[in-house]
Amino acid sequence: MQFTRTTIPTAFKTVTRKKLAIAAAVLATSFTAWAQSGSTMQVEMKGSKGTMLTGDVRSTFDSPWAMTFLPDGHSLVTEKSGTLWLLDKNQQKRFEVSNVPRVTAMGQGGLGDVIIHPEFATNDTIYISYIERDKQNNEFSGAVIERATLAITDTGASLSDRKLIWRQSPKMIGNGHYSHRMAFSPDGHLFITSGERQKFTPAQNMAMNLGKIVRLNADGSVPEDNPFYGQGKVTEQIWTLGHRNPLGIDFDEQGNLWAHEMGPAHGDELNNIERGRNYGYPAVSQGDHYSGVKIPNHEDYPVFKAPELAWVPAISPAGFIIYKGNKFGDWKGNGFIGGLSSKALVRVAFNKDEKGKWSLEEAERYEWGKRVREVEQDGVGNIYVLEDKEGGRLIKLNE
């Protein structure tokens, strides 16, 4: 059998190429829209007790660090390198916010936490933390807090009226353990976590606000009912002391304050924060020094307030919320902690025994192979997590 070669008319070739090009363009556009929306990309999270959660990817970021929601459903996300993003109500990137503080990201430091004022709906005020280098010697640094006004228009978003209201004191050499997480209390006070900068002893030094949890008024002034008020400009800021690297802070619905902190070699803690108390670091810890030297446990020195829950081995806790919504009804009042080395979202159940003593337990942890930097809840009860590092995804948990 002999085959003959058929010549295809040039005009037909041209039309076919055009159709193929149009089809390719449509496919590319569809893929881009799908990739940007992320609404159809789903993540499966395996629970340690057999539960399977799913979540939808909304956006991706370069080393995201913190997130907060605005009353209208928009949100703000910080990237450690110095970018502040405004997301739309579908949690897709809308604008890069302008006039944000300039930062030099080094080690654990860069652009950090972001929260809104309790009366944001009427004053458009936000708070942002970041790392400030010393002007005379770049090796020295410390966390600072700015208060600013957020303006959103149809064409962009920007900060104005920026005012620095708090500094870690003193600045230290090194680029670790800044902490600089923030939360507002139900009565409108600003609480700030301040790490001991990997220097140990500042956590017990009352002339420094390092290794402490600080309590301020919303304008940055010091409340006169602080436990050490009148004992010096730095000392009177202190609410509690003896902390290492507290990277999560939130209030429960009863107004109790909770904060977790990253321990040394193991011994991560979740603490009930009480006015004027000493939590013991570096004299006590549920973990050991990285050198292998044993640190006494809290039980050995009961003068220090012990954690309500500790992890050995470590989970490396990051973001933190106590869930107050109704969408996940069985989880109301539970804590959610982002795990870095544990690569998990850790759920904690809060209970009290018959004597009124706190009884906390890890209820379950959900894993999908990614470090979890931040956990946040929106105004209608949805839960979101932010993965750590470059390409970190914002994931909305499904009910």
Image (cartoon, rainbow, N blue to C red):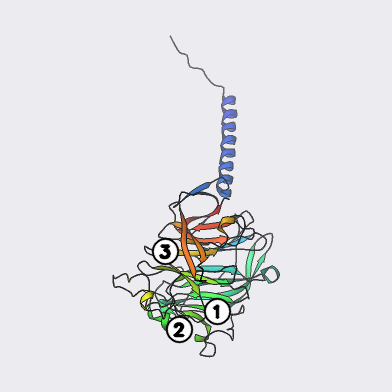
Report which residue position mark 2 lands on.
208
Pointer 2 or 1: first along the chain: 2
Residue 187 as seen in the image, left or right of residue 63: right
Q: Where is residue 181 in the image (x, y as percent from the top left)?
A: 51, 70
Crowding at mark 2 (Cα within 10 Å: few <14, some 14-19, many 20+): many
In depth, the one of 28 and 217 nearer the eye is: 217
Q: Which residue is drawn at 59% across and 25% down?
A: 11
In depth, the one of 98 and 204 nearer the eye is: 204
Report which residue position mark 1 lands on.
215
Q: How far apart are marks 3 and 2 (CA)?
A: 25 Å
Question: Callout 2: helix, strand or loop?
Answer: loop
Query: 274 above or below 100?
Result: below
- View extreme (right): residue: 122
Q: Where is residue 284 in the image (x, y as percent from the top left)?
A: 37, 76
How many marks the image carries: the answer is 3
Q: Is residue 9 visible to us here?
A: yes
Pointer 3 or 1: first along the chain: 1
